[in-house]
Image (cartoon, grey):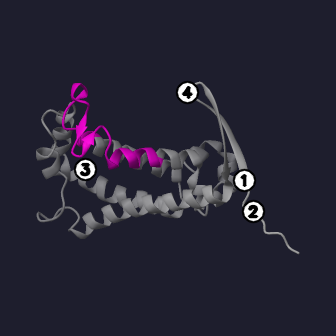
Amino acid sequence: MATKRRPAERTLESSLLGRTVSFNYSETWVAYSIVGLRLVMAWVFLQAGLEKLADGGFGDPLAWSSAGFLNNAIAEANPVHGLFLWFGEYASIVDPLVIFGQILIGLALLFGAFFRFAALMGALQMLFFWTAAWQGGLLEGFPVENGFFIDSSFVYMLLLFGLAAWGAGRLAGVDGILESTQPVRSNPWIRYLLG
């Protein structure tokens, strides 16, 4: 009689805030969840970039542009309001960076190629979106439209950080193949971009 094989189970032991923590987890389900989260984040970036590109890209006066948002939608009480006004002066540079940045980040996340670099760039973009959403400063608790401190951009930023830490590009991704190539083995610093 054949026995049913259970998914591989491991125990993670670590130190968190000076306290030892330990828990069991299934390698199989962790792998599925990491790939699933990677695909969801890929979709978020691809959809955003492709929608902006479909709206005419840049150069067309009726096309999507960051200028309206940067010059008019950032609360004056936001401590970095001036930075976004400065970005608004350079919308002709910011627009293609946002549009093609989102598309390229989405593709890199989707295919697991240069994943850590793409996740870092995505997290940086989410950091800018999050700080732009502040309605006030520290003394006001950094309120955002739907609460205090946390919004979807902040969640995406943390999710991208976690996926990069796990090396999500190696799971059913191009980075797993790239890491075994001679150029990467000869130049181990490249691994910081992969994973």
Count neighbours of disc 3 (C-alpha within 10 A) and say few if under 14, some if 14 to 19, many if 20 or more: some
- The kind of secondary structure element at disc 2 is loop
Task: Measure how far apart labels 2 and 3 are at the Cα level.
Answer: 50 Å
Looking at the image, do the residues carrying marks 3 and 4 touch, with CB atoms under 8 Å apart?
Answer: no
Could you tell me the amino acid type at mark 3?
Answer: Val
User: Range of the magenta residues?
Assistant: 131-160
Disc 1 to disc 2: CB gap under 8 Å: yes
Question: Which amino acid type is marked by label 1?
Answer: Glu
Comparing 191 with 147, the one in front is 147
Q: Which residue is mark 3?
A: 94
For residue 17, the mark is 4
- Foreground mark, 3 or 4? 4
- Other residues around mark 4 within 10 Å, as few (<14) / some (14–19) / many (≥20): few
Query: Eyeballing the image, is 25 above or below 46?
Result: above
Q: Using residue 95 as the reference point, say whether residue 12 is left or right of it.
A: right
Q: Which mark is residue 98?
A: none
Q: Position of residue 20 (x, y in %)?
A: 65, 30
The residue nearer to you, when weighing 135 against 73, is 135
- Which of labels 1 and 3 is toward the front? 1
Q: Position of residue 107 (x, y in %)?
A: 45, 63
At label 2, the amino acid type is Arg
Name the residue that disc number 1 marks. 9
Residue 162 image point, x, y percent:
51, 46
Q: Which mark is residue 6?
A: 2
